[in-house]
Image (cartoon, grey):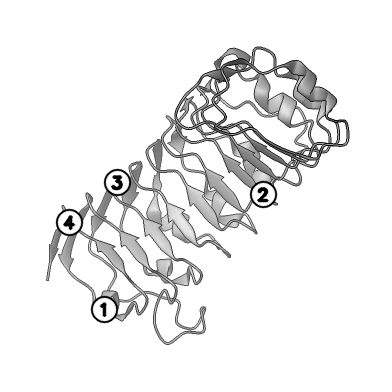
Amino acid sequence: MKNLIYLNLSNCGFIGAIPSNLGNLSNLQYLDLSSEYSNDLFIENIEWMTSLVSLKHLGANYFNLSMVGSQWIEVLNKLPMLTELHLDGCSLFGSIPSPSSVNLTSLAVISISSNGFNSTFPEWLLNVSSLVSIDMRLNIFHGRNPLGLGELPNLQHLDLFGNYLEGNISQLSRKSWKKIEFLNLGMNDLHGSIPSSIGNFCNLQYLSLSYNKLNGSLPDIINGTETCNSKSPLPNLRELQLEYNQLMGKLSNWLGELKHLEVLYLYNNQLQG
């Protein structure tokens, strides 16, 4: 089986430790060990993964990695071809230390939601310019929401829902967010007023700022008709969630001009029709 390039063992019902001789599959490009909402599979020592030098896709959702501590990032940093990393619900905790030298230059997708990470945002990720999708929802990341996220040139999907990240929404929106399509910053500690520059997110399809501390009124107008080469603001927006904030004042006319909007949440604010 040394020539094996694809191995999918997801949801097979296996229990116990993953054998380290999987590391002999040096040509493996795709490995999925995920299970649905159970931690019956576990790894005691993750070092064998460094032999998977051809690996591009690693799926291990709901796989018990609690015994490897923070060692997982140093090991995966030695996989130069890795493009997708899925470690949702893996009982990981603590911080995500910066590798001594970041080699994840091909990484496009990192999904580490529903773990127990309790630290500031791992800012070394801002140097991984290949990132297209970041999913870190439902952890305990705290401190400043890094402004550099808005300058990642290929980022299309960012989900930080359910953390304790702080920041001013006006500062965040001033970044370019060139390709962002999905932006979920709900249930954090963001504050400030929603600025008119939010309209410059031309490709945005989903925006959630719910369950934060946003205040003030909605902007009378929003930018973007020239930037986005469109007659209407936010021309691709389909879902907008602003519920459970401290917004007040009248509803703005531009809300009625969002031509593709399908879902709008504004409840539990102090807005007037």
Query: Does 126 appear above or below 121?
Result: below
Q: Which residue is mark 3?
A: 212
Q: Residues within 10 Å of mark 1 (few under 14, many from 20)?
A: few
Q: Amino acid at mark 4?
A: Tyr
9 vs 235, left or right, is right
Q: Earlier in the sequence, mark 3 or mark 1?
A: 3
Q: Are marks 1 and 2 in contact (CB under 8 Å)?
A: no
Q: Position of residue 40 (x, y in %)?
A: 52, 19
Say which quadrant the C terminus sits in.
bottom left
As measured in the structure, the alpha-carbon distance from the residue carrying label 2 to the one carrying label 4 is: 35 Å
Q: Position of residue 119 (x, y in %)?
A: 49, 27
As measured in the structure, the alpha-carbon distance from the residue carrying label 4 to the one carrying label 1 is: 17 Å
Q: Which residue is mark 4?
A: 267
Q: Position of residue 180 (x, y in %)?
A: 53, 61
Q: Which residue is mark 2?
A: 108
Q: Earlier in the sequence, mark 3 or mark 2?
A: 2
For the image, the number of numbered tags is 4
Query: Does 245 appear above or below 266?
Result: above
Q: Which residue is mark 1?
A: 256
Q: What residue is rendered at 53% in x and 23% in y? A: 92
Q: Are marks 3 and 4 in contact (CB under 8 Å)?
A: no
As measured in the structure, the alpha-carbon distance from the residue carrying label 1 to the one carrying label 2 is: 35 Å
Looking at the rendered image, the disc whose residue lies closer to the viewer, 2 or 4, is 2
Q: Quadrant of residue 271?
A: bottom left
Dot 2 lies on which element? loop
Q: Earlier in the sequence, mark 3 or mark 4?
A: 3
Looking at the rendered image, the disc whose residue lies closer to the viewer, 3 or 1, is 1
Q: Earlier in the sequence, mark 2 or mark 4?
A: 2
